[in-house]
Each structure stands twice: as structure tokens, then as C-alpha cells.
Amino acid sequence: MNNPLVIFLSLFVTLAIFQLLLLLYLANKKIKTNKKLAHEQAIYAEAMPAYIQYLNSDPNESIPLPPNEYHVAEQLFSDCMAIIKDEKLQNNVRESASSYLSSHYEKVMKTGDWSSRVNALYYMEDFRMTSLQPLLSNRLKEVHTNDEETQQLIRTLAAMGDLSVLTYLENEPESTESMYLSVFSRLPEDVVPKAIDYVNKDGSLKAKTSLLMYFGLAKNLAYLPFVEEKLHDENSALQIQALKAIFRMNYISDANLLTPFFKSDNWIERMFAVKIAGVLSLSQFEHILVELLGDSIWWVRYYTADALLLTFGENKLKEISKSHPDHFARDMASQWLTLGRQVTQNE
């Protein structure tokens, strides 16, 4: 009769002891963590003003940080990169990071766990630690999974200007446009021309379209010649990406480059041609825009009406809404007049 009660009491006492031990363990761990954090914060508070002074003094002096304080160093260098805008001083911070952290990161990449490696890669990207580029290149060749570590390896090597990542992406069936974009957006400015040469010569369609997407997002007119060159490409996907890039750049060197696209069999090309004409207020295309307001595709008509309004004003749409021979064109002009009045009232 008493056996079940004894067993229950034994289990209860065992569980209570286990919970007490677990509580003591967690409390002790928290105390140690807080103590370590307080220690690191004290070192950081003392090191920051000394390091700022160091950056503006003799570079042959030792970095004012105790040895092996890697978490403090990461935070210190990262914060300095965020607040310092002078390029020379930023390079000095990167040199400090390379000097203090390179050996540590090399050990992490060889023996550290997954999360430690990924965390180190993020910092290596921020600090552009080119001294570790060979190590990372070899690491990329060794990995066989497309996880966060692999993707961060690619991003970090791109920030270092290593174009071998493009070859890696070209040979990876699972490579996406976003992965290409992450590479192009991180390349140092002086490496971009080499990337253009590589993509033009050996790049896949995915690489070329991604590069055009990047140029459109970057809105750097230095890349406009490459973008406009692709308007003449035989591949419609490249032509469309080039039109999108020009629309985002909000500039075209010669408006006549758009002329063939107004008559294109591809409605997306017609749509982007009229969008560009509208945002750039290209009045020389008035006759073509009026004609395209009767296009068979609703989206082309929609953006044509927008282009006419942007370029010629509301009176032009009022005229078209009454006189255009195509009833779809008259309807779209009327809709945009109504839409324009609604926007004005809401403002």
C-alpha cells in the first residue's frame, strides 16, 4: 500500500533537487555572464577614447587594447567604422582590425563552431580583412551546402574584391539573382569594371540581368554606357532589364534609343518605353504616346496616360478623352483625370 506513495515522494524529491540544481546552475551562469559583460564594458569605456587618440597619432604605437579581448575589439572597431566618415581614418580602423583580429579569426574559421564562423565572417566583411582572403577562398571551395555560412563567405569575399565568387555562382545551379546582387553591391568601386568585363565575356544570362538590376538600383550614371549597350542585345530579357535600369536611373543619353521599343511586339518593352518617356518628359514622343493610349494591353495604356499627364498636363488628357478614335484610350484618359483629381483632393 505504501510503495506507490514512497515512489511518488522519491520522484518528487528527485525532481525538486534537480530543479534546485538547475536553478543554481543558471543563476551561477548568469552571474558569470554579467561579470564578463561588465568587465568588457569597462575595457570598452577605457579603450574608446584612447583608441580615437591612437587613430590620430603615430601608427607605429600599439593598439590600446589588452590582448585577447576579441569581443571588445569587434565592438570597438565596428562602432568606429559606423561613426567615422573620413576614408583615411576608416582605412586605419581596418588595419587595426586586421592586426588585432586576423589570427583569432583564422583560428575561428579552422576550429570554431558554425555560429562563430558566421559571426566572424560578418565582421571580416565590415573590416575588409583582405589578409584572410586566401583562407576564405579555400573555405568556399570546401563547403558543400548552400547555407548562411556559404552565402556570407560569398558576400565577404565580394567585399574584398575577389571576383572568383562570380565563377563560383556561375557553377552553382542554385545561384539566385539576389545572390548575384549581393555580390555586385559589395564589390569595391575599382573592381566593378573588371566585373563588367567578366560578365560580358563569360557571364550567364542570370549574371547579366542581375548586373543590370544592380546598376538600376545603384543609379550611378557611370554605368549607363553598359546599360544602354544592352538595349541592342538580341535577348529580350536583357533589353527589358536595361529599360528598367534606365527608368530607375532617370536618365538616357539619347532619347532615340527608345524609338524601337514603342513598336515592340513585347508589351513589357512598350510599357517601360512609355514609363521612361513620362518620367523624362520626352515631348518629342507625343504622337507615339497618343497612339499607344489605345494599346491592346491595359498596363501599356495605364502608363501611357501617366506619361501624357506628366509631360503635357491635364489639358492634354481632357482633349484625348473627347477626341481619341479608340474608346479604350478615351476611357483611360478619363480614368486618369479622375485619379488625378482624387490625388489632389487627398493631398
Image: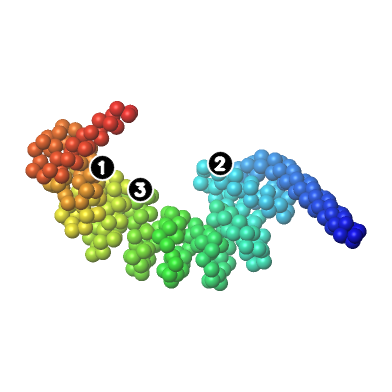
Q: Please provide percent x and percent y for residue 239.
A: 26, 58
Label ID, residue 48:
none
Residue marked by disc 1: 279
Q: Amino acid at mark 3?
A: Lys
Q: Residue at x 78, y 51 (%)?
A: 26
Residue marked by disc 3: 219
In-image side of 56 versus 330 (left or right):
right
In-image side of 180 versus 267 (left or right):
right
Label 1 secondary element = helix
In-front residue for pair 244/227:
244
Q: Please provide percent x and percent y for residue 9.
A: 87, 55
Distance from the alpha carbon under mark 3 to that under mark 2 = 25 Å
Q: Can residue 142 be seen by looking at this rendering?
A: yes
Q: Please provide percent x and percent y for residue 271.
A: 23, 50
Q: Residue at x 22, y 55 (%)?
A: 267
Q: Amino acid at mark 2?
A: Ile
In the image, is residue 126 above or below residue 106? above
User: How many C-alpha atoms fall within 10 Å of the one at disc 1: few (<14), some, or many (≥20)?
Assistant: some
